[in-house]
Image (tube, rainbow, N blue to C red):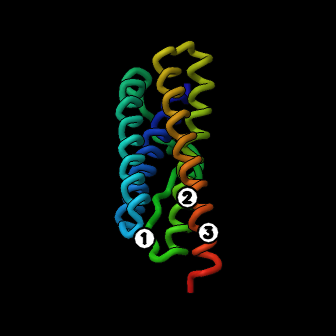
Amino acid sequence: MKLPVYLSLLAGSEQTLADSYRQVAEAHGDEPDVHFLCLTLATQCDARRERLAAVIARYGAAPADDEPERLHTQGLGEPRTGPLGLLRDLQDVYLLASFADVTWMMVKQAAQALRDVELLDLVADSERDIEVQLRWLQSRMKQAAPQALIAAR
């Protein structure tokens, strides 16, 4: 069974996403909505990862050593500055959140096949959280784009 590989991948992607939200919050503290909401979203990622730990305890964890490197998530690196930097950082976080979202979707398929009610509940909650995160990121990028792409120097 390869579910432990994806559970480990999911735990890692949630950690990377939380860390990235915190980086954006710190780098863009001059945007109060971004700062405080990114900290809140990071806390949501932490909570999902904590709940996932109980599932990992049951199924085990397995690094994706035999999987292609492209299955691993990368964090933001150095956050950028200014309006364009905010837009690019939000875009990067959006990609990370999308990766987590699709990974939860695949774990859901396994949970359905296993009839694991606890994991299905966790997936349902996680999918709702990430859907809200993705919508906020899209909205915030739409708000930032005109300033960053037209008005900023």
Q: State the SS at label 2.
A: helix
For badge 1, the amino acid type reads: Glu
| 75, 32: nearer the viewer | 32
139 above or below 65? below
Dot 3: element: helix
Q: Nearer the viewer, mark 1 or mark 3?
A: 3
Disc 1 or disc 2, which is closer to the eye?
2
Locate residue 28: give its quadrant: bottom left
The residue indicated by pointer 1 is: 78
Residue with the mark numbered 3: 145
Disc 3 crowd rating (10 Å Cα; few below 14, some 14-19, many 20+) is: some
Quadrant of the drawing holding the C terminus:
bottom right
Going from N to C along the chain, the mark reached first, 2 or 3, is 2
* Residue drawn where x is 36% and y is 41% of the image: 46
Q: Residue at x 55, y 24 (%)?
A: 1
Q: Residue at x 50, y 14 (%)?
A: 117
* Residue 128 vertical position relative to residue 13 in the rendered view, above or below: above
Q: Is residue 43 above or below residue 73?
A: above
Q: Give coordinates of residue 118: x percent, y percent.
A: 46, 17
User: Residue 2, percent across and down?
Assistant: 55, 30
Q: Which mark is drawn over residue 140?
A: 2
- Cβ–Cβ below 8 Å for labels 2 and 3? no
Q: Of helix, strand and loop, which one carries label 1?
A: loop
Q: Mark 2: which amino acid?
A: Arg
Mark 2 to mark 3 CA distance (whole Å): 9 Å
